[in-house]
Image (tube, rainbow, N blue to C red):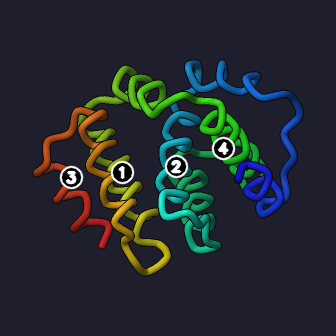
Amino acid sequence: MLDAIRKLIGVSVPGTPGTHSRVHPHDVRVAACALLVELACADGEFSAAEQARIMDILQRHFGVDEAGARRMLAEAAAANHDAVDHFVFTRQVVKDYDVAQRIVLAELMWQVALADGSLDSQESYLMRKLASLLQLEPAFLAQARKKAE
């Protein structure tokens, strides 16, 4: 799936598996992007709408240009592929983001989940799981969903 993502966005990331996993502890944006990618792929498809939404998020909220967004997306996809579980990313986000920033991230995650026009049961499950790992109350998650819709 990682190669499909790389081909889709037109970026090749040099290196071998495992070399990217040490990047996200230093850049919370890569960890947050990895969560967005995981959510986008939860239904088994990384749609063009989901990709476009993530690219927009990276440019508007993470302050990178289009080329930087493509690199960050590829790096996040590689880190996600190398990771054993979601905890490595959520731990970094909880460490570096305050509650308000994590609520904004939850809203962005909902935007990605809803980007293709439907909410798959796997996406819904993963949102609840990630919200718990991000230490967000269910009310915050519901509020973030309403904003995203």
Q: Work out whether residue 115 or residue 42 is closer to the camera in this orientation and state it.
A: 42
User: How far apart in space, not on screen, are marks 2 and 1 (Cα)?
Assistant: 9 Å
Mark before the other along the chain sequence, 3 or 1 = 1
Q: CA distance from mark 4 to mark 2?
A: 8 Å
Q: Position of residue 99 (x, y in %)?
A: 24, 34
Q: Mark 3 or 4, which is nearer the eye?
A: 4
User: Which residue is depicted at the point 85% across and 58% down?
Assistant: 10
Mark 3 or mark 4, earlier in chain: 4
Mark 2 lies on residue: 38
Q: Circle 3 is placed at which residue position? A: 141
**Disc 1 + disc 4, Cβ < 8 Å:** no
Q: Amino acid at mark 2?
A: Glu
The secondary structure type at the circle numbered 4 is: helix
Q: Which amino acid type is shown beneath numbered disc 3? A: Leu
Residue at (24%, 57%) from the top-left corner? 144
Q: CA distance from mark 1 to mark 4?
A: 17 Å
Amino acid, disc 4: Ala
- For the C terminus, the image quarter is bottom left
Q: What is the number of the mark on residue 126? A: 1
Residue under label 4, please give it.
Answer: 77
Q: Looking at the image, tell me whether mark 1 or mark 4 is earlier in sequence order.
A: 4
**Is residue 87 shown left or right of residue 47?**
left
Q: Earlier in the sequence, mark 4 or mark 2?
A: 2
Q: Are marks 2 and 1 in contact (CB under 8 Å)?
A: yes
Q: Residue at x 78, y 63 (%)?
A: 8
Is disc 3 in contact with disc 1, using a CB cutoff of under 8 Å? Answer: no
Q: Dot 2, how many residues are within 10 Å of its Cα: few (below 14), some (14-19), or many (20+)?
A: many
Closer to the camera, 45 or 65? Answer: 45
